[in-house]
């Protein structure tokens, strides 16, 4: 009798505990942001946990250079996170590998209704949208107002010919003929080589790097490559000059993404607003365009918590009490931009400074063009960078550099035909 009572009591206890244990859920989020950058989101994670008892949110940080490899390795090991913060150029490779889950209809409607169309294009791969747009980066001409004034110019260039002339006037050299103040700066990374090239090509009306047409065999591409190489031939820049030198006050102009704002602000301090100007990409006419890329929130296709993951992401990206969303707050604090219409409207005051406003206007007006997210887009941009650097250094003519890029890119682009 005693045993049966104990057995019955144990069964009742297990019946009570089992459902409670089943309600416990851990959602793991992987991104490249530091703990300090994630601080606003971390506060939102804790609030979400309070509102949803039984849910625990864990953040995994990985350096952006290692992120994709980390993702692939975790998938093989069976330890994939539930949610990824995906760099758009990775999405083609990730969808081809079956890593990303398709958003449910309610989330797709949320994205369609709430985000700038060009931003939605930036998170599309294989004809489908794979997640909720997050941080948006686009490129504009950034210039040092003081250096341009000292060289006799009261406005930034509107064409590449004007830019070349201004760069030559701004450049200063020391007794050893080394550049001490550069008229213009590029750099050795994809962001400072390939991306300015793509922005300049977009400004001339060409959307490059499509599976069916690279755009590199066009007169516009030759004009862009020639113009970039001429700055080196003129002595207005050199390999020793890089975009990262801009905050020291020794660079006149560069095509730079909006995320560089914090670095510039730290470098110039109180002189930032009076020194740093932002202008459209120099083009021959008013209908200029520029290049844009994005990060987005996606869900792992094998996650056992897909429904809960999408619910969390939608909550994090929904405006709160007429203000910004959690993601919008995080991006604003770190100097990032968003394609969320509601977050842009709620941040009108903060986004109205002289540096940020032109970027926001370019995104909102549809001037920022997102490229196709191809399977091998990361390799495509690296190959383009290598060809560009050869034109800069003079080891290849601009025409030959473009031909080399075309040869290198052709098999990579063909994989998406």
Image (spheres, rainbow, N blue to C red):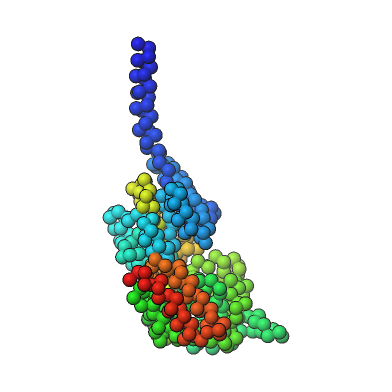
Can residue 176 be seen in this snapshot? yes
Q: In this view, does 141 lie to the left or right of 318?
A: right
Q: Nearer the viewer, residue 104 or 376?
A: 376
Question: Which residue appears at 43% of the width and 52% of the height?
Answer: 75
Which quadrant would residue 380 be assigned to in this image?
A: bottom left
Quarter of the image with the C terminus is bottom left
Q: In this view, does 36 lie above or below 178?
A: above
Residue 286 against residue 90 in the figure, above or below? below
Residue that lies at the very extreme toward the top in this rendered image: 1
Left or right: 231 as drawn, with respect to 159: right
Q: In which quarter of the image is residue 298?
A: bottom left
Q: Residue at x 42, y 65 (%)?
A: 89
Question: Relative to 250, is 5 on the left or the right?
Answer: left
User: Could you say where residue 67 lies in the image, as x and y percent from the top left?
Assistant: 49, 58
The residue depicted at 36 percent of the width and 28 percent of the height is 16
Comparing 4 with 337, the one in front is 4
Would residue 345 be visible to someone looking at this image? no
Who's the residue at 59% across and 82% down the image? 237
Q: Position of residue 225 (x, y in %)?
A: 48, 83
Q: Is residue 169 above or below residue 325?
A: below
Quadrant occupied by the N terminus:
top left
Image x and y of residue 299, in percent: 38, 53
Q: How many marks?
A: 0
């Amino acid at each position: 009798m005693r045993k049966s009572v104990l057995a019955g009591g144990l069964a009742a206890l297990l019946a009570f505990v089992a459902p409670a244990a089943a309600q416990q859920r851990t959602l793991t989020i992987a991104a490249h942001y530091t703990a300090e950058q994630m601080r606003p989101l971390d506060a939102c994670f804790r609030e979400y946990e309070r509102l949803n008892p039984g849910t625990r949110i864990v953040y995994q940080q990985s350096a952006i250079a290692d992120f994709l490899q980390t993702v692939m390795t975790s998938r093989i090991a069976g330890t994939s996170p539930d949610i990824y913060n995906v760099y758009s150029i990775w999405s083609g490779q990730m969808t081809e590998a079956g890593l990303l889950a398709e958003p449910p209809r309610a989330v797709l409607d949320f994205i369609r209704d709430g985000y700038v169309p060009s931003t939605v294009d930036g998170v599309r791969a294989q004809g489908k949208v794979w997640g909720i747009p997050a941080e948006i980066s686009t490129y504009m001409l950034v210039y040092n107002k003081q250096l341009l004034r000292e060289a006799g110019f009261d406005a930034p260039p509107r064409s590449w010919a004007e830019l070349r002339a201004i760069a030559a006037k701004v450049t200063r050299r020391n007794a050893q003929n080394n550049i001490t103040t550069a008229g213009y700066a590029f750099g050795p990374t994809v962001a400072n080589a390939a991306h300015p090239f793509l922005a300049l090509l977009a400004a001339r009306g060409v959307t490059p790097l499509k599976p069916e047409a690279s755009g590199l065999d066009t007169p516009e591409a030759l004009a862009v490559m020639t113009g970039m190489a001429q700055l080196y031939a003129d002595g207005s820049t050199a390999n020793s000059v890089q975009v990262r030198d801009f905050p020291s006050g020794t660079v006149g102009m560069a095509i730079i993404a909006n995320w560089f704002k914090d670095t510039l602000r730290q470098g110039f301090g109180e002189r930032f607003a009076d020194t740093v100007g932002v202008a459209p990409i120099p083009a021959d006419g008013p209908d200029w365009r520029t290049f844009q890329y994005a990060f987005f929130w996606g869900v792992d296709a094998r996650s056992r918590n897909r429904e809960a993951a999408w619910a969390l992401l939608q909550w994090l990206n929904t405006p709160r009490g007429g203000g910004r969303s959690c993601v919008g707050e995080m991006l604003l604090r770190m100097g990032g931009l968003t394609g969320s219409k509601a977050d842009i409207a709620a941040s009108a005051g903060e986004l109205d400074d002289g540096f940020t406003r032109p970027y926001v206007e370019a995104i909102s007006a549809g001037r920022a063009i997102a490229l196709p997210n191809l399977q091998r887009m990361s390799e495509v941009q690296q190959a383009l960078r290598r060809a560009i650097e050869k034109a800069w250094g003079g080891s290849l003519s601009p025409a030959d550099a473009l031909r080399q890029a075309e040869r290198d890119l052709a098999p990579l682009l063909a994989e998406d035909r």
